[in-house]
Amino acid sequence: MTDTPTQLFIGGAWVDAADGATMAVDDPATGEILCHVADAGPKDARLAEEAAVAAQEKWARTAPRARSEILRRAYEIIVERTDELAHLMTAEMGKPLTEARGEVAYAAEFFRWFSEEAVRIDGGHATLPDGRNRMLLSRRPVGPCLLITPWNFPLAMGTRKIGPAIAAGCTMVLKPAPQTPLSSLALAAILKEAGLPDGVLNVVTTSRAGEVCEPLLRGGRIRKLSFTGSTGVGRLLLAQSADAVVRTSMELGGNAPFIVFEDADLDKAVDGAMVAKMRNMGEACTAANRFFVHTSVVEEFGRRLAERMGALVVGPGTRDGVDVGPLIDRNGRGKVEELVADAVERGARVLVGGRTPEGPGCFYPPTVLTGVDSGSRLMDTEIFGPVAAILTFDDEDEVVRRANDTPWGLVGYVFTEGLDRALRVSERLEVGMVGLNTGLVSNPAAPFGGVKQSGLGREGGRVGIDEFLEYQYLAVPVG
Ligand code: NAP
């Protein structure tokens, strides 16, 4: 912690906020203040934007191989410093160290992946159908970008955006979530060490997100917004982006259905449920939010899931053997408590958990609710906590209809041993990603993203870099 930067990173330099403001970063396991970081205002945001704009032209002309090698070096530094970065993330966000180490590896992989993509940006050359004209097609960086990230994956949500932006030749202003600024600042220090030129990445930590971001989106110099966060904030930012016709990528919320058919392998289904529900304490956009379990297996599935959930150890993420850390803050925990209370009032039965422990920190126990009424609030709200809500169904058409009956469409999980049904149901789900007999879909080599109100665009995979590139077409007459 002692070496972690706490200032803004603008034009390659570490600076205080212009008005000297700072904000506290809390440890969610104790509620105590870990440290203070600079709290940027609109003036700092303008300076960060100017640095990004000034660096853009030269950066766009850098050899793709040079951009690739910076990413590769940063990947290696992150891997070398896994332990240090994992401790930092656990301190500010709460996740257990084993999960934090997993996130460091996941985050680093985006840099390795995009270091390989940076040198594969291609174009085209064709004679047009009239035979009199040629088309030369090239790809160019979209320009200075604003990147806004949430607190739940403090490192990976940053590298998933910064990696393709660097690979494409874009400069950036990154605004991380105020709960978890330290991981982003550490990342900026690593990229500087890896040789990233000044001004290509600028980081503004702030408690005044609206004041800082809106002028950048409306100002006309930022050409791209890449946002990960809730659908409500995403909608607001889309509206703000409209004035200057800013290109957007939106990774928004989810309401994932997790469907267990009567022919599912229940061992696989329970293993999958543990991952889909408990990764990151349930604070993931991909978290299974609604468990639809066939009536014939619901009792057995519920019993086994409750047994596994009840065996998890809850405590501070830094303590050995802990599986479940605290939730991010009191607001986050309060929302989970309200959703559980509402479901119970409407007749749900608590198989395990469901009671907030006494004492400091924002802990909430792994909880399984069964017999959940489909009118319960948690059916159309992201729970964002360690609560599995089980409903029953009787036939395929019915479950597909209910699974799709939501404005979100990020991910769905399907458990069945029947190949035909597996493919048919997956194709009928209105989602961007499906976990088929698995509870984990996230992978840097796969396109991550949703349909409907879960977002626009994809991150990662072969298409991840496209979000940061434009086409330019040259018309050339055939001589
Ligand atoms: P959030 O409240 O939407 O905030 C996300 C980011 O947006 C934070 O940095 C936040 O800063 C900032 N923000 C909020 N209002 C803003 C404004 N008016 N102008 C500019 N920035 C603004 O979401 P969260 O609670 O941090 O994260 C959880 C949400 O993220 C969930 O809905 C989850 O599903 C979603 N998520 C989606 C994905 C995906 O890939 N689809 C991945 C991870 C998380 P402040 O906190 O200071 O407002």
Image: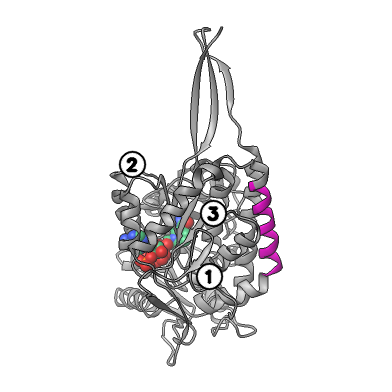
Residue 461 location (% of width, % of height): 59, 46
Asked whether 84 or 46 is in front, the reply is: 46
Residue 330 location (% of width, % of height): 38, 80
**Picture quarter containing residue 387?**
bottom left
Q: In the displayed structure, would residue 16 be above or below residue 230?
A: below
Asked whether residue 136 is drawn in magenta, I would say no
Asked whether 274 or 137 is in front, the reply is: 137
User: For the residue labelled by badge 3, is the local secondary structure a helix, a strand or a loop?
Assistant: helix
Three-letter code, disc 3: Ile
Asked whether 479 or 393 is in front, the reply is: 479
Quadrant of the snapshot with the N terminus: bottom right
CB under 8 Å between callouts 1 and 3? no
Instruction: Specify the principal SS of the magenta part.
Output: helix
Q: Which residue is mark 3?
A: 162
Q: Which of marks 3 and 1 precedes in the sequence?
A: 3
Q: Which residue is mark 2?
A: 245
Three-letter code, disc 1: Asn
> What residue sits 64% from the left and 41% below the top?
63
